Amino acid sequence: MSNAKTDGSSGDWIDQEFAGRKFKDERSARRFRAMLSQLSSAPGQSIPLVCQDWANTKAAYRFLDNARVDETDILAGHLRSTRERFALSDAPVLVLHDLHSAHCLTHFRVITAGDCGFEATSAS
């Protein structure tokens, strides 16, 4: 399955991935969209590198430190979109995670199909 953007712009991908997701604060939604656009321009790079200036870097870190924004707000649209993509596949879906830069592996847990809203099935 391709993760290609619909017309090459990060805005379309972001709109599609997070359609219907609302933050408690509209400013947070705008900052999140801007931050995703910046991060998608250079996957795997650091926040300061992709933000390119101190104002955008500081805004990104403030967003991530905002008590009114939590993991559920950030991941809800992505998890919904992922469930939709899984539902379109008749074949097993292999989900790979790159943890090469993870320093605290104790914070990670195994995510099962049930965590994504699916029942686990065994291969025949």
Image: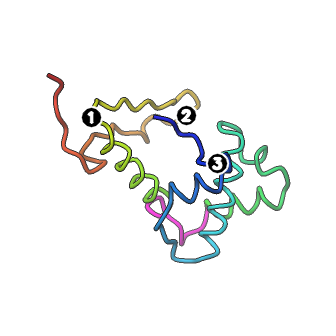
Q: Which residue is mark 3?
A: 7
Q: Which residue is mark 2?
A: 103
Q: Residue furthest front?
A: 7
Question: Which one is closest to the eye, mark 3 or mark 2?
Answer: 3
The percent position of residue 8, horizontal first and vertical second, equals 67, 45
Q: Residues within 10 Å of mark 1 (few under 14, many from 20)?
A: few
The percent position of residue 67, horizontal first and vertical second, equals 55, 69
Quarter residue 123 falls in: top left
Region in magenta:
65-73
What amino acid does circle 2 point to?
Answer: His
- The quarter of the picture where the N terminus appears is top left
Q: Residue furthest bottom?
A: 25
Q: Which residue is mark 1?
A: 90
Q: CA distance from mark 3 to mark 2?
A: 36 Å
What amino acid does circle 1 point to?
Answer: Asp
Q: Nearer the viewer, residue 105 or 74?
A: 74
- The quarter of the picture where the C terminus appears is top left
N-term-proximal mark, 1 vs 3: 3
Q: Colour mode?
A: rainbow
Secondary structure beneath dot 1 equals loop
Residue under the image location 77 percent in, 47 percent down: 48
